[in-house]
Image (spheres, rainbow, N blue to C red):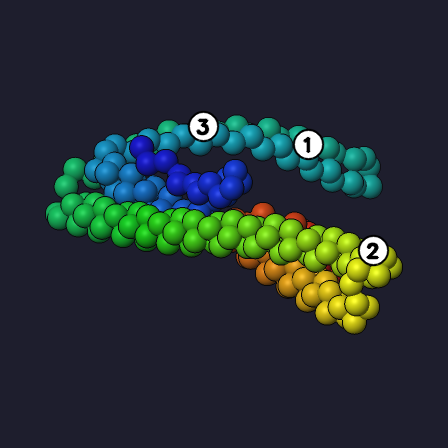
């Protein structure tokens, strides 16, 4: 029996394209139905009915109750229907294989995209750490330079350049963090675990 394919992205297990999965299940059921097309078919029916009637006349009121029960059994067996059963079975099998191939291809594409996006997130995370380290070094250098200027060991005009370096480091750190958040959001959306999208999809329309 074919099992549903899933994709694991950074520990988040998500279904790979539910539409293709449902199509594959539908094709599999159609194929199973076609396989038993020439087998005997049996069915049973049962019914229980209650009728109450009331008639009012000048001399009195007549009330009547009737209970009816019915049970039925039916059987059918198509001994031979030409090549229709064989053709239906082959058609259902072809549809099943096509649906499964579509599901496999879609799952592979999603896996490749998820892995690429995961690598991109890892690179951006490293960039954030690097820019944060540079920002801290620039701030520490500015602090030491201020002490040297107060002691008269360094000219005061060097403070402007050091402050500019701190501003550039802060801007680079903020840009790296923004890129990281953008790549992470793309990965979360790809994994189907975006809380904002889930919240919007669960809201009832007025």
For mark 3, what is the residue?
Answer: 71
Distance between mark 1 and mark 3 Cα atoms = 24 Å
The residue that mark 2 highlights is 147
> Looking at this view, is 160 or 14 the one in front?
160
Where is residue 9 shown, x and y percent of the image? 49, 43
Say what secondary structure mark 3 lies in: strand
- Residue at the location (34% across, 41% down)? 29
Q: Cβ–Cβ below 8 Å for labels 1 and 3? A: no
Mark 1 / mark 2, whichever is N-terminal: 1
Q: Are marks 1 and 2 in contact (CB under 8 Å)?
A: no
Q: Residue at x 78, y 63 (%)?
A: 154
Residue at left 37%, top 32%?
Answer: 43
Of badges 1 and 2, nearer the viewer stands 2
Relative to the observer, which residue lies in front, 171 or 134? 134
Expressed as whole percent of the image width and height from the top left, the position of residue 205 reads: 71, 59
Q: Residues within 10 Å of mark 3 (few under 14, many from 20)?
A: few
Residue 192 position within the rendered picture, expressed as x and y whole percent measured from the top left: 55, 50
Judged from the image, the secondary structure of the residue bearing numbered disc 1 is strand
């Amino acid at each position: 029996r074919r099992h549903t394919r899933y994709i694991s992205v950074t520990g988040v297990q998500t279904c790979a394209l539910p539409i293709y999965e449902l199509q594959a299940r539908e094709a599999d059921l159609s194929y199973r139905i076609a396989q038993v097309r020439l087998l005997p078919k049996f069915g049973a029916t049962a019914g229980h009915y209650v009728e109450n009637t009331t008639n009012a006349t000048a001399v009195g009121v007549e009330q009547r109750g009737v209970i009816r029960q019915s049970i039925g059994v039916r059987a059918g067996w198509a001994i031979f229907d030409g090549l229709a059963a064989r053709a239906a079975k082959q058609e259902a099998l072809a549809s099943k294989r096509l649906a499964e191939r579509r599901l496999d291809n879609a799952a592979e594409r999603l896996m490749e995209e998820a892995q690429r996006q995961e690598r991109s997130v890892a690179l951006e995370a490293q960039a954030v750490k690097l820019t944060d380290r540079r920002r801290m070094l620039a701030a520490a250098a500015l602090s030491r330079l201020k002490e040297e200027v107060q002691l008269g060991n360094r000219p005061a005009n060097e403070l402007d350049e050091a402050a500019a370096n701190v501003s550039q480091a802060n801007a680079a750190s903020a840009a790296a963090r923004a890129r990281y958040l953008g790549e992470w959001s793309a990965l979360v959306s790809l994994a189907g675990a975006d809380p904002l999208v889930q919240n919007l999809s669960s809201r009832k329309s007025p």
